Amino acid sequence: MAYCPKCGIQVERDNRPCPLCDFPIPKVDDTQADIPNKFPKAENPYPVHLRRILNRIFIFISLLIFVAISLMFYVNYELDEAFTWSRYSNLSVLAGWVFLYFSFGYVHSYYKIIIGMALISLVLLGGLDIFDGSLDWFIPLAFPIVVGTAVIGLCYCTLIRFLSVRRFNVIGFFFIAIVILSMWINFFVSSHEGEVNLLQWLIGTGLQLLPITLVMLYVKYGLPERIKQKAARKFHL
């Protein structure tokens, strides 16, 4: 039912005059045609254009790498009638190509990037050591360092994501991860040289982490809010 726009009584939906005040009642059309949108949806073509350029660059570099690998194998075999130095070079070039694949943004998950880079690093370092005829330094040195780096990186990303770490805390956690990684590498390098002392290593790690922890606590609880906001705007944190 409709209502008279003049007196307000309830009437039928037609053009006849209102039975009370004789005002003509306009017809009401329930079907509303779809009105085309005069303003098209705004889209940013830059990411698509950039992706196409990166794809072309990556394909071009991949072709160059394939040609370089084939040429090195050919030259090495022609000179020595065996694959000697070309094994080291081509394995390094292939590992660099995989790192380049990750850096060109084809993998979006940080977890997959960290694990993938760790695996290709293990293949590279293990292969180089195997080409020397043994695993003298890969097992005691390279393997734990690469695995430890990957674990620290995964833990850092997990803390940032699930603890909702923001602004200055991201930088603080990053420096803590760098200190732990440095001490981790120092431990296995010293262990490989036979000069490690676990207690001294733990004390040294704690002493290096202490200043960063104190700075983070001061920034969180002691620094005035206006200074933190000003610094955040300055450095886009």
Image: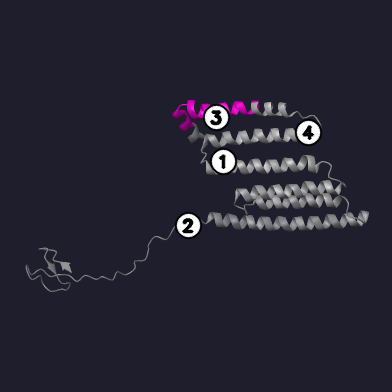
Q: Which residue is mark 1?
A: 159
Q: Is residue 211 magenta?
A: yes
Q: To which quarter of the image does residue 169 belong? A: top right
Q: Point out the stretch of residues depicted in magenta.
A: 207-230
Which is more toward the observer, 122 or 3?
Answer: 122
Residue where numbered disc 4 is placed: 191
Question: Residue 178 placed where, x, y %?
Answer: 65, 35
| Mark sitting on residue 216 | 3
* Vertical placement of residue 110 versus 35, above or below: above
The residues tagged by marks 1 and 2 sit, at their Cα atoms, a distance apart of 34 Å
> In the shown orientation, is residue 229 left or right of residue 96?
left
- Tag 1: residue type? Leu
Q: Residue type at mark 3?
A: Met
* Three-letter code for the amino acid on which mark 2 is drawn: Glu
Comes first in the chain, label 2 or label 3: 2
Q: Position of residue 157 (x, y in %)?
A: 59, 43
Identify the residue position indicated by label 2 in the image: 43
Q: CA distance from mark 4 to mark 2?
A: 57 Å
